[in-house]
Image (cartoon, coloured by chain):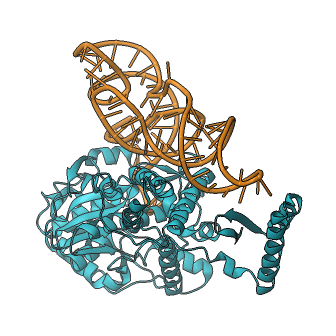
Chain colours: A cyan, B orange
RNA sequence: GGCGCGAUGGCAGAGUGGUCAUGCAGGGGACUGCAACUCCCCGUACAGCGGUUCGAUUCCGCUUCGUGCCUCCA
């Protein structure tokens, strides 16, 4: 019952050994809230929700922290464009993010800290770095002194020389070293800012996660995660800040022991990103597809692999979701028995670096067994296995209440037509019965004949 | 330019040194008046070239192609 995963820091698959098996601590970098979340943002949320579900099924206590970045230059731009206060933007999109993720079956993090509520912590951490000679103030900025960190580059596997060679941005004149990054920057009067020992300003991006992770989890903690594009520079810089502040710069694991990174969602092979403009908003997609279908789609590929978003992916996910719903209908009056064959279970697939594609294939076999059980006596066990699988995969199986949206008048009309159709069928007047079916389809109603009679459903 | 990842049947996507992935799509059949659902059957997939091996899709090397990070990005 041990978890294995690919640790980005060691670049190999390892067995997860908790720092404290009685309390697992996980941090994952959350979104910057200035717009609707796109599918790529959702992948991060679903992947780490999946990790946390697995962890919570194995350990007595798990604390999952995932932040909201609510101070950032892009937010300031968005607020200015909309002509509203920053808070209005950040509150709106934080709420929408949480609602959208909930519709995908993502449980809220145990703690969801906001950057603006930790400015003091960031200032304090920045001061410590200055005091210890790892940071310096210059022209209202405070910069992290990268050459002062002997382990810098441990996560991303880059030497400083490589970065300089590849530097595509002009180096600010106040930087001592081109690789130095901002911990604190000055704000003009019309920009959001806080008072600090270095004047009125705002934090750089990386410092917030160092501050919030330490504040809420303590150091070191077990697992730190996020999207693969955060590995460098964001995560690299977090390690530098936290380890240097704690005089443990030579040991990158003194911040977080393991690092997990999810791959990207792509569209026609290219990364879905805001800059390319090829992104789809979760908010829009859930208008057309149930949340669980999106979640299944996001779990179709292994979390470290790219996931190509397409209509066919959604179609396939939708089919699986229908099969799950059908299985629940079949099992409606069966008592479940929780007695899982662990070796071949969905959970055991997840233990191996969160192999969701394998888990889904096992779910499919399970569904087949439910549709055609060797003996009916097997059903209670199968139901138990299904419930366990669905629970750990976070798939909300909701009975379609879509028929509720049909008006009472229409229901009467439908029932009348169905009664007429049964009569026609009894008289072997199949021409008439097919006509009735066509009429219903025109009304947007699909029917199906079962042993128990005819059921109908809004399309 | 530096560092990294990937290449599996029409599509998606696991996995393995030597017998099965799985799903979607497609074809055939069973069931049903017909549909739908469900069930059964059907495709000699592992980029190319070398090497290691009794044996490689799986290990090693090279080539080609694709893609990611190095700039805000999950």
**In the current view of this chain or complex, which residue is farthest to the front?**
A427
**Which residue lies at the image location 87% right of the left edge and 62% below the top edge?**
A435
Work out whether A258 lies above or below A308: below
A8 or A179: which is nearer to us?
A8
Q: Can residue A321 be seen in this view?
A: yes
Question: In the picture provided, is A317 more to the left or to the right than A171?
Answer: right
**Which residue lies at the image location 70% right of the left edge and 81% below the top edge?**
A405
Screen quadrant of the N terminus of chain A:
bottom left
How many marks the image carries: the answer is 0
Instruction: Residue A341 in the image: state x and y as whole percent.
Output: 30, 57
Q: Can residue A170 be seen in this view?
A: no
Question: In the picture provided, is A302 more to the left or to the right than A429?
Answer: left
Instruction: Residue A367 in the image: state x and y as whole percent.
Output: 47, 56
Residue A359, picture quadrant: bottom left
**Which residue lies at the image location 49% right of the left edge and 63% below the top edge?**
A295
A388 or A209: which is nearer to us?
A388
Work out whether A232 lies above or below A210: above
B57 or A309: which is nearer to us?
B57
Residue A84, picture quadrant: bottom right
Question: In the picture provided, is A53 more to the left or to the right than A372?
Answer: left
**Which residue lies at the image location 55% right of the left edge and 72% below the top edge?**
A36
Instruction: Residue A123 in the image: state x and y as whole percent.
Output: 26, 80
Instruction: Residue B26 in the image: state x and y as whole percent.
Output: 68, 39
Screen quadrant of the C terminus of chain A:
bottom right
């Amino acid at each position: 019952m041990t978890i294995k995963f690919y640790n980005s820091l060691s670049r190999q698959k390892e067995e997860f050994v908790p720092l404290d098996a009685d309390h697992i601590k996980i941090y994952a970098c959350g979104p910057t809230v200035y717009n609707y979340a796109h599918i790529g943002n959702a992948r991060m949320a679903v992947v780490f929700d999946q990790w946390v579900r697995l962890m919570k099924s194995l350990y007595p206590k798990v604390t999952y922290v995932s932040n909201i970045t609510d101070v950032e230059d892009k937010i300031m731009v968005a607020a200015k464009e909309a002509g509203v206060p920053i808070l209005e933007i950040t509150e709106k999109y934080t709420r929408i993010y949480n609602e959208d993720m909930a519709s995908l079956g993502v449980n809220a993090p145990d703690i969801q800290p906001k950057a603006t509520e930790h400015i003091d912590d960031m200032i304090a951490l920045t001061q410590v770095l200055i005091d210890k000679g790892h940071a310096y103030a210059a022209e209202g900025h405070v910069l992290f002194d990268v050459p002062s960190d002997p382990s810098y580059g441990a996560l991303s596997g880059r030497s400083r020389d490589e970065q300089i060679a590849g530097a595509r941005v002009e180096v600010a004149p106040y930087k001592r070293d081109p690789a130095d990054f901002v911990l604190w920057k000055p704000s003009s009067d019309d920009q959001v800012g806080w008072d600090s020992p270095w004047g009125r300003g705002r934090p750089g991006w990386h410092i917030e996660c160092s501050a919030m992770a330490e504040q809420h989890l303590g150091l070191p903690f077990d697992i730190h995660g996020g999207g693969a594009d955060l590995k460098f520079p964001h995560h690299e810089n977090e390690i530098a800040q936290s380890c240097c502040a704690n005089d443990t710069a030579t040991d990158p694991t003194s911040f977080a022991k393991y690092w997990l990174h999810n791959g990207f969602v792509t569209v026609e092979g290219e990364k879905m990103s805001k800059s390319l403009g090829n992104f789809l908003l979760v908010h829009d997609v859930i208008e057309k597809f149930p949340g669980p279908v999106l979640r299944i789609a996001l779990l179709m590929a292994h979390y470290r692999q790219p996931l190509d978003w397409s209509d066919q992916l959604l179609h396939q996910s939708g089919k699986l979701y229908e099969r799950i719903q059908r299985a629940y209908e079949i099992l409606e009056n069966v008592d479940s028995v929780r007695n899982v064959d662990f070796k071949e279970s969905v959970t055991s697939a997840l233990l191996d670096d969160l192999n969701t594609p394998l888990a889904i294939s096992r779910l499919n076999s399970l569904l087949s067994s439910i549709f055609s059980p060797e003996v009916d006596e097997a059903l209670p066990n199968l139901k138990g296995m299904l419930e366990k699988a669905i629970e750990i995969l976070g798939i909300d199986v909701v009975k379609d209440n879509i028929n509720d949206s049909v008006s009472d008048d229409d229901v009467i009309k439908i029932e009348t037509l169905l009664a007429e159709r049964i009569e026609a069928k009894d008289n072997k007047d199949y021409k008439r019965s097919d006509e009735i079916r066509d009429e219903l389809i025109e009304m947007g109603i699909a029917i199906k004949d079962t042993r128990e009679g005819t059921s109908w459903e809004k399309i």
